Image (cartoon, helix red, strand yellow):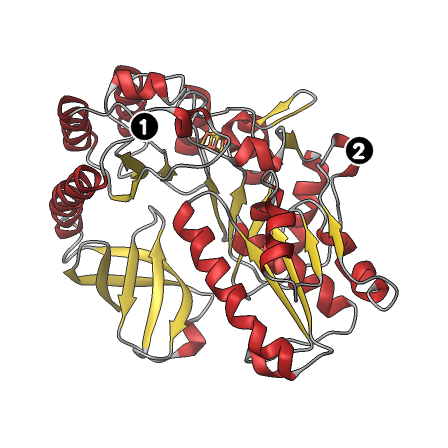
Amino acid sequence: MNVHESEKIAGLLSSNGYTKVSNMQMADIIVFNTCCIRDTAEKKILSKIGELKALKRKNKNLIIAIVGCMTQQEGKATSILNTYNYIDIILGSNNHLDLVKHINELSKKKKIVQIESLDNNNIIEDFPIYRESKYKAFVNITYGCNNFCTYCIVPYVRGPEISRNPQKIIEEITGLLSNGIKEITLLGQNVNSYKFEDIDFNKLLIMIDNINVVKEFWIRFMTSHPKDLDENIITTIANSKHICNNIHLPLQSGSNKILNLMNRKYNREQYLNIIKIIRDKIPHCGITTDIMVGFPYETEEDFLDTLDIIEKAQFMNAFTFIYSQRKGTPASEMPQIAPEIKKERIMKLIKKQNIIAKNISNEYVNNTYTAFVESYDHKNKILIARLQDGKQVNIKNNDISLLGCFVKIKIKNAGISALLGEVI
Ligand code: SF4
């Protein structure tokens, strides 16, 4: 999500005559797009901001802007300005469009802070976007979130969920496909709850699947929510021409007690039932997930429930996290688990999930697939491709004319999260 927002900020600057430079020392303007979902991301960005002091001392005309959801936490903008008094502009994640206006006003004002929430009347459309890839693209379908999971800061900083007009989404996707983009990822905090008038996520997927400006393209989406991913959506994916057999379905915990404390609004039985429906309807679906350990009140028994469910669900890949306390959320007021217990649990979780992922990876070896070549890793001289189910395949080949192409490949070897393949 943040990567795409950075593309929008870069698009805005480049459409106003600014050009990208290769290092911070050469820049006249430095924009930090921040994220506050996890404490580690916030600490990292604050340390980066601290490093800019020396640059600002050398170049008095350097403009430094901090944007994104970190600035929207209560009292954060003031505390950033107090600690880092060389920052010029602070904007919330819904105020990007005003960045250039503020840059131009800096000659009259000393510091600028703008943090406003988004409402249905100010979804910004036709925004210039500087896309990092010529072959794949992100397209927002919703903004914000209504779910209030008790550990999560997003609804407080990003505001309520708003769905984009489907016509605008179709226009954007049609334009991208006409310009050579082959893979599009639909974005939203909870894409499954998309709703614009009588168009829900299922209808939107059907509309997108019916776009016919080019023959071959793939559509992915993230993130899904287990309480909203229903059988209709799964059936649509199964019957579609372009929607990938790849679903990212955050589990968070395998314990019903913890899921309830997290306010996730599903239980482990319901979660496993969705997995069963997906497996029954969509053959070879790549299911990935997010799992958190060390949530308040998590006992050893709760953690064992998580280990048990990952065995049952057989995730192709899992993003595993230690719970991180976010000020202002209900969970941050609950009794916290000791760091050494959290560390021990994450190690056990990773170890178990790695065995599962490796066993799944092994099943690909010696089989052939269609893969989309999405980028080239200059350092390791490999093409990075992805199968329709989301599995990454590294190809030892430096034929960059294959970038942006669908190719036939044979899998030669398997790692935990990526495969090694060759073009056939
Ligand atoms: S669904 Fe829950 S975890 Fe995801 S953004 Fe919304 S509140 Fe946060």
Which residue has dot 2 on it?
A: 121
Instruction: Point out the residue furthest to the front here.
Output: 82
Left or right: residue 269 versus residue 197 is: left
Q: Is residue 57 above or below residue 157?
A: below
What is the quadrant of residue 224 in the picture?
top left
Amino acid under disc 2: Asn
The image position of residue 5, as x and y in percent, is 60, 53
Left or right: residue 16 versus residue 41 is: right
In percent of the image, x 39 and y 73: which residue is there?
376
Amino acid under disc 1: Ile
Contact (CB < 8 A) between labels 2 and 1?
no
What is the quadrant of residue 255 in the picture?
top left
The image position of residue 40, as x and y in percent, is 39, 51
Instruction: Point out the residue furthest to the right here.
Output: 108
Instruction: Report crowding for label 2: few under 14, some 14 to 19, many 20 or more residues within 10 A (C-alpha).
Output: few
Res 278 label:
1
Instruction: Report crowding for label 1: few under 14, some 14 to 19, many 20 or more residues within 10 A (C-alpha).
Output: many
| Residue 143 seen | no
Element marked by disc 2: helix
The image position of residue 181, as x and y in percent, is 56, 59
Q: Is residue 384 above or below residue 254?
A: below
What is the quadrant of residue 82 in the picture?
bottom right
Q: Earlier in the sequence, mark 2 or mark 1?
A: 2
The image position of residue 201, as x and y in percent, is 55, 28
Closer-to-camera residue (301/252) = 301
